[in-house]
Amino acid sequence: MLPYTVLLRTVPMLVILTVLSAAAAYVHVYLLKIFVKPVMIATSVFIPATLFISAVCAFVGSFMWDGDVEPTWGETVG
């Protein structure tokens, strides 16, 4: 004889937990779609802009030297 009382308690619990976890996954993906998009757009603008500013600073800094100090490899003509 099978223990039907265990099955009567286990199957509904498994169904409830499966449905709740699936709903949580869908809600999580939906919230990521809403909140990650602005962050990705800001990142795609911010990183190239900061790299460009860093490159300009490095290029400008390569032309600066003191007249009394012998130039090194950093003080080239660009």
Image (spheres, rainbow, N blue to C red):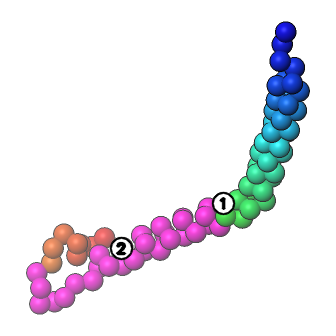
Tell me the residue at 85%/9% (across/down).
1
Return the x and y of residue 63 as percentages of the image width and height: 29, 79
Prevalent SS, magenta region? helix
- Nearer-the-camera pick, 36 or 2: 2
Question: Considering the image in quadrants, where does the C terminus appear?
Answer: bottom left
Return the x and y of residue 32 as percentages of the image width and height: 74, 55
Q: Is residue 20 visible in this depiction of the protein? A: yes
- Where residue 35 sits, quadrant-wise, is bottom right
Q: Is residue 52 left or right of residue 36?
A: left
Q: Magenta stretch?
A: 41-70
Q: Residues within 10 Å of mark 1 (few under 14, many from 20)?
A: few
Q: Is residue 22 visible in this depiction of the protein? A: no
- Nearer-the-camera pick, 6 or 66: 6
Disc number for residue 40: 1
Q: Is residue 29 left or right of residue 59?
A: right
Q: Amino acid at mark 1?
A: Met
Q: Is residue 57 left or right of residue 46?
A: left
Tell me the residue at 42%/70% (across/down).
55
- Nearer-the-camera pick, 43 or 57: 43
- Where residue 72 sits, quadrant-wise, is bottom left
Tell me the residue at 16%/89% (across/down).
67
Residue 71 on the magenta span: no
In the rendered view, would you say 16 is above or below 57? above
Residue 44 on the magenta span: yes
Tell me the residue at 72%/64% (across/down).
38
Q: Is residue 24 left or right of residue 50?
A: right
Disc number for residue 58: 2
Q: Amino acid at mark 2?
A: Ala
